[in-house]
Image (tube, grey):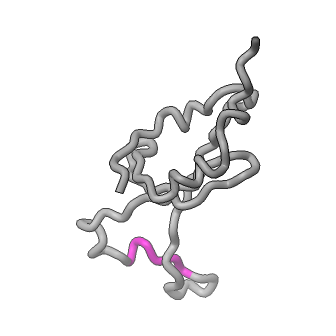
Amino acid sequence: MSEPAADARISLPHLRSLIGLRVSHQGTPCRVVEVLESPPSLVLEPLIDPSAASNSASHIMANVHGQPGEYAVESRIVLILSDDQTGLNDALLELEIIDQS
């Protein structure tokens, strides 16, 4: 009997249970903030280093007139499934769990 495809073993409710999980993505501490349904993906936002928070000007985005505007938040998207949809994506497998708080 053949093994079910990877997407059949991964449920959306299970992926949503990962929201709030802290992970390391390419060496940067991040938090899972959302799950996209199609294609199945995790949306990550880098955690702000408290020691760097004093320099908040580096996180302010200029508007079209060059005036300081809203805080810019970087998002990273990590696909769940591989390109052929039969296994897990390498980027997902490279995530390291920091903690579960």
Classify 79 as above or below 76: above
Seen as rendered, the residue at the extreme left is: 51
Decide: is 68 above or below 38: below
Residue 90 versus residue 101: which sits nearer the camera? 101
**Frontmost residue, 101 versus 83:** 101
Q: Residue at x 62, y 55 (%)?
A: 35
Magenta segment range? 57-62
85 w.r.t. 35: above or below: above
Residue 86 horizontal/vertical position (percent): 72, 26
Depth order, front residue of 9/97: 9
Give coordinates of residue 6: x percent, y percent.
68, 30
Q: Quadrant of the N terminus?
A: top right
**Given the current orientation, which residue lies at the most extreme front position?**
1
Q: Position of residue 12 (x, y in %)?
A: 66, 49
Was residue 66 drawn as part of the magenta stretch in this picture?
A: no
Residue at 63 percent of width and 51 percent of height: 13
Judging depth in this view, the residue of 89 and 52 nearest the camera is: 89
Q: Is residue 22 left or right of residue 5?
A: left
91 left or right of 56?
A: right
Which image quadrant for residue 88? top right
Q: Residue at x 37, y 51 (%)?
A: 100
Quadrant of the drawing holding the C terminus: bottom left
